[in-house]
Image: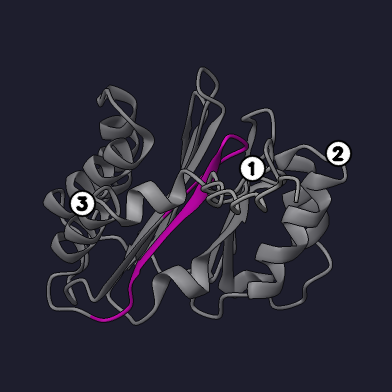
């Protein structure tokens, strides 16, 4: 099973994506994007990382998420084995599920959110992910973690989960990209990694490196001590 969620918080201008699966390296395979393009989630029995990148390029050029998904998936003769979701710069969503995707499979949308899944234990999994995100208050990473945990409680993967990932981006902050590529407890480990990323010194460092809105940001430099002036006088 692979489940992914993509979301946009219009109030804060924050994009967020998360994914979990019973296989390796879900973050590297599935999640792509940033605050200048929107986000994509490409998955399936034969997932295309090319889809993930191409849909971002289309949205960055001005296409809506739905238009971008259609333009990327339509020419691919192997699309029956793939799944794609996207959220664009205005928070609009699009998705595609190939007819050969392992059931239970498909996607659900909500205001500023799309959840896609395949090889689901039940539709309750994908519904729980979406509904938990929409009903949870707080920062984007916390809402995404709550959504993944709700999906796992609703049935998750009959094979057990093996990897999980989180991606958060906004123009005013540095990207947060967290991946647990192989673990017996990937959601717990992802939560622990998120907590660590919010502690010093790492968190302080993220506040002084460049962002899209402040591309030249750097730590304040300590002014050097002035050199002593040469003594002057008359003979």
* Residue 213 vs residue 138, the one in the foreground: 213
Q: Which label number is shown at residue 62? A: 2
Camera-near label (3 vs 1) is 3
Tag 3 residue: 195
Residue 186, image x, y percentages: 20, 68
Residue found at x 22% / y 41%: 146
> CA gap, disc 2 to disc 1?
14 Å
- Earlier sequence position, callout 3 versus callout 1: 1
Q: Which residues are magenta?
A: 167-182
Tag 1 residue: 35
Element under disc 1: loop
* Residue 234 vs residue 124, the one in the foreground: 234
Q: Main secondary structure of the magenta part?
A: strand
Q: Quadrant of the N terminus?
A: bottom left
Relative height, residue 71 to residue 124 (above, below): below
- Earlier sequence position, callout 2 versus callout 1: 1
**Can residue 96 be seen in the rendering of this structure?**
no
Residue 147, image x, y percentages: 27, 42
> CA gap, disc 3 to disc 2?
35 Å
| Residue 180 falls inside the magenta stretch | yes
Residue found at x 78% / y 45%: 59
């Amino acid at each position: 099973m692979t489940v992914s969620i993509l979301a946009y918080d219009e109030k804060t201008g924050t994009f967020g994506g998360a994914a979990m699966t019973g296989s390796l390296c879900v973050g590297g395979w599935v999640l792509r994007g940033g605050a200048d393009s929107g986000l994509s989630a490409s998955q399936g029995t034969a997932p295309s990382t090319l889809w993930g990148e191409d849909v971002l390029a289309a949205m960055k050029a001005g296409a809506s998420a739905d238009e971008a998904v259609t333009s990327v998936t339509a020419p691919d003769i192997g699309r029956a084995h793939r799944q794609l979701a996207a959220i664009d710069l205005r928070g609009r969503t699009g998705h595609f599920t190939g007819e050969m995707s392992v059931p239970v499979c498909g996607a659900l949308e909500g205001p500023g959110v799309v959840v896609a899944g395949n090889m689901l234990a039940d539709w309750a999994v994908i519904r729980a992910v979406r509904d938990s995100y929409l009903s949870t208050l707080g920062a984007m990473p916390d809402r995404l973690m709550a959504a993944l945990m709700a999906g796992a409680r609703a049935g998750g993967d009959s094979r057990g989960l093996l990897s999980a990932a989180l991606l958060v981006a906004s123009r005013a902050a540095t990207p947060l990209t967290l991946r647990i590529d192989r673990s017996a407890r990937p959601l717990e480990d992802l939560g622990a990694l998120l907590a660590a990323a919010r502690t010093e010194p790492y968190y302080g460092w993220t506040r002084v490196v460049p962002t899209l809105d402040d591309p030249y940001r750097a730590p304040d430099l300590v002014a050097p001590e002035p050199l002593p002036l040469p003594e002057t006088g008359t003979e």
